Image (cartoon, grey):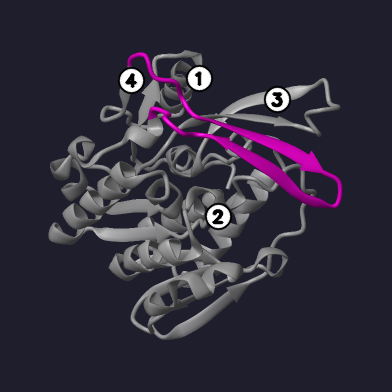
């Protein structure tokens, strides 16, 4: 039995300054669900990751990393002759990083409903999905829907992080329709302050809604009560991955039976750890380090 089952795309991440001028770059592997699974595993939880990687060096590195961190990758498949996707992040002084996606035709985007193990999801405590995977294409969206349906049938708690990436969607309207659908199917909803309008139908008093407010901290509405915590003041090396690290911390605290306020606190601790590292996941703490 898994504590948290998740599905998504593991991909390469190249970080640099402005590519046309910079001679140095950093190679890593990552992805929203990838970071979440590692964050949970480091805290001693049983995390399962479902995905597809190419039969290339990036795919091998992603699988090696997940296995090394103790994540269950029994359901992840290597697709022969297909490449693993890639993100290029270019830093900008005083501006948000510029992110270019090289995901079209990637192994991870070929995830399909036939790859979803209904029995394994049914035996899990939590299913976590994101809007990133839902935006990778029709097959990937149907895989997310199949996983959510399996969880609902088995009465498994469904966690959904909106994670709206405009580049992955044909239009805002289509994104709103899909993200609202998945948000309404969830028991636990994670989103940023700027994503509230995308999932308005899901913002009901009965649903546990966690809002990342950036420098202002985070808040949750649970059991018709609102709780807030401030963001820790730490030096920021790279903000990428902080949202996924936050979700890992929150789910970890939920699995430990902690209160909403304590869940927020652990989420912000993991988020702070993520931003102090150049990697989305390498700076995340172990249970002893909490």
Where is mark 1, residue-wise? Answer: 58
Q: Return the x and y of residue 34 as percentages of the image width and height.
A: 46, 38
Instruction: Choose the circle earlier in sequence order: 2 or 4.
Output: 4
Q: Name which residue lies at 38% across and 75% down.
A: 202
Res. 26 mark: 3
| Mark 2 → mark 3, Cα distance in angstroms | 25 Å
Q: Residue furthest front?
A: 170
Q: Return the x and y of residue 90 as percentages of the image width and height.
A: 74, 37
From the viewer's perspective, is the residue at label 2 or at label 4 nearer?
2
Residues in magenta, as a range: 80-107
Label 3: how many Cα within 10 Å (few below 14, some 14–19, many 20+): few
**Observer able to see residue 194:** yes
| Mark 4 → mark 1, Cα distance in angstroms | 11 Å
Q: In the figure, 133 relative to 72: above or below? A: below
Assess whether residue 214 is covered by the magenta stretch: no
**Observer able to see residue 212:** no
From the viewer's perspective, is the residue at label 2 or at label 3 nearer?
2
Tag 3 secondary structure: strand
**Is residue 102 found left or right of 278 in the rendered image?**
left
**Is residue 10 found left or right of 157 in the rendered image?**
right
Tag 4 secondary structure: strand
Tag 2 near tag 3, CB within 8 Å: no
Where is mark 2, residue-wise? Answer: 166
Tag 4 near tag 1, CB within 8 Å: no
Q: Name which residue lies at 47% across and 43% down.
A: 43
Instruction: Choose the circle earlier in sequence order: 4 or 1.
Output: 1
Q: Name which residue lies at 54% across and 53% down.
A: 165
| Mark 3 → mark 1, Cα distance in angstroms | 13 Å
Q: In the figure, 249 relative to 281: above or below? A: below
Where is mark 4, residue-wise? Answer: 78
| Mark 3 → mark 4, Cα distance in angstroms | 24 Å
């Amino acid at each position: 039995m898994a504590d948290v089952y998740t599905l998504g795309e593991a991909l390469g991440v190249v970080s640099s300054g402005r590519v046309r001028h910079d001679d140095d770059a950093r190679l890593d592997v990552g992805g929203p669900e990838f970071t979440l699974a590692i964050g949970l595993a480091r805290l001693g939880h049983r995390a399962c990751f479902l995905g597809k990687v190419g039969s290339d060096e990036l795919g091998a590195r992603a699988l090696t990393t997940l296995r090394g961190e103790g994540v269950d990758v029994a359901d992840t498949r290597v697709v022969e002759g297909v490449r693993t996707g890639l993100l290029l992040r270019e830093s900008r002084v005083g501006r948000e990083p510029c992110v270019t996606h090289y995901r079209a035709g990637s192994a991870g985007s070929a995830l399909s409903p036939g790859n979803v193990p209904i029995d394994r999801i049914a035996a899990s405590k939590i299913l976590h999905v994101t809007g990133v995977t839902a935006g990778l294409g029709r097959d990937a969206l149907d895989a997310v829907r199949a996983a959510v349906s399996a969880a609902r049938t088995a009465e498994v708690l469904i966690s959904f992080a909106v994670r709206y990436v405009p580049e992955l969607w044909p239009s805002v309207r289509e994104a709103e329709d899909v993200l609202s659908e998945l948000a309404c199917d969830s028991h636990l909803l994670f989103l940023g302050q700027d994503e509230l309008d995308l999932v308005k139908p899901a913002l009901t008093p009965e649903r546990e809604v966690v809002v990342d407010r950036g420098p202002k901290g985070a808040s949750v509405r649970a059991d018709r009560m609102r709780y807030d915590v401030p963001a820790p003041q730490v030096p920021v090396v790279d903000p990428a991955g902080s949202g996924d690290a936050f979700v890992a911390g929150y789910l970890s605290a939920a699995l430990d039976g902690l209160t909403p306020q304590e869940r927020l606190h652990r989420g912000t601790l993991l988020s702070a750890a993520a931003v102090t590292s150049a990697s989305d996941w390498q700076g995340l703490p172990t249970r002893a380090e909490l």
